[in-house]
Amino acid sequence: MSQVEIKSKDEIVLMREAGRIVSEILDALEQAVAPGVTTWDLDALAEKLIYEKGARPAFKGYHGFPACLCASVNHEVVHGIPSRKRTLQEGDLMKLDFGVVYRGFFGDSARTVPVGKVTAEAQALIDATRESLNKGIQAMVAGNRIGDIGHAVQGYVEARGFSVVRDFTGHGIGRRLHEKPEVPNYGQSGSGMKLRPGMVLAVEPMVNQGTYEVALLDDDWTAVTLDNKLSAHFEHTVLITEGAPEILTRRRSG
């Protein structure tokens, strides 16, 4: 028997609200990203806004993670810990990975934001990663399979000379931050579990400029590229419907 939860209409209403809160706070964080700002500043802003909106942090305390925001810079792939010592510089790539819990339901999303002006190569990585997420979401149609999502992401990314991280995947989401099934960002079309209306999945390509291999820093959280080249990350929480997929964490700003 499948352990994947199919959300009820009432649960979907709450997940839409959680997704809206995540998106609005990410809009504010994105606006705050600038040279001279520390990743600690961004985390403090995130925490303030979470409670103002009547939610609570999804990440803080999760398996001991110490912050509300995963703040990963440049070659850091994911799970970067905010720090007063990490001041953003012109040309950095800032990855904002963020989630909330609202009335018992989670929302989760990520964006990569250029700090000031970045190189053409860095912008190409950002653009390819954002578009690979769009390609993955387009494959999130009832009757398709999990492998169709990863296949769409991987095909788009590798055709542009970049690589897809294997060590971290997307996931189901709902009453728990990480539910079944895993949603790899690579794979074969037509493989894996069939997508059904009412499933809610967080799909999150992590794309590297060089090798797809990663390493873990001594803080036991921050994953970095093995070759120290740049990495980008985008994520949305998406509802499978009878028709087109619904992005619950879609951007609210223009």
Image (spheres, rainbow, N blue to C red):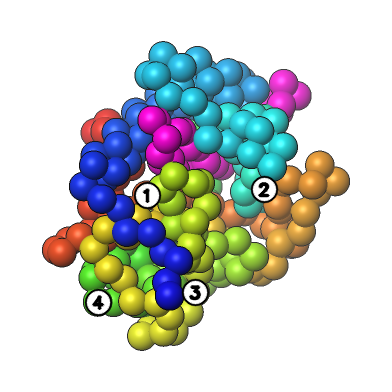
Helix, strand or loop for disc 2: strand
The disc labelled 3 sits on which kind of residue?
Answer: Tyr
Q: Residue at the spot x=49%, y=74% of the render?
A: 186
Comes first in the chain, label 1 or label 3:
3
Residue 40 drawn at (x, y percent): 65, 22
The disc labelled 4 sits on which kind of residue?
Answer: Gly
Residue 132 in view here: no
Which residue is more in the foreground, 237 or 123? 237
Comes first in the chain, label 2 or label 3:
2
Helix, strand or loop for disc 3: loop
Which residue is more in the foreground, 192 or 169? 192
Q: CA distance from mark 2 to mark 1?
A: 22 Å
Comes first in the chain, label 3 or label 4:
4
Mark 2–mark 4 CB contact (< 8 Å): no
Foreground disc of the pair 2, 3: 3
If the image is split into quadrants, where does the N terminus sit? bottom left
Q: Residue at the spot x=79%, y=47% of the render?
A: 220
First to last magenta residue range: 83-111
Comes first in the chain, label 2 or label 4:
2
Q: CA distance from mark 1 to mark 3?
A: 18 Å
Residue ID for mark 1 = 237
Residue ID for mark 3 = 186
* In the image: residue 220, left or right of residue 47: right
Reply above or below: 99 against 83.
below
Residue 154 drawn at (x, y percent): 46, 73
The disc labelled 2 sits on which kind of residue?
Answer: Glu
Q: Which disc is residue 76 wearing?
A: 2
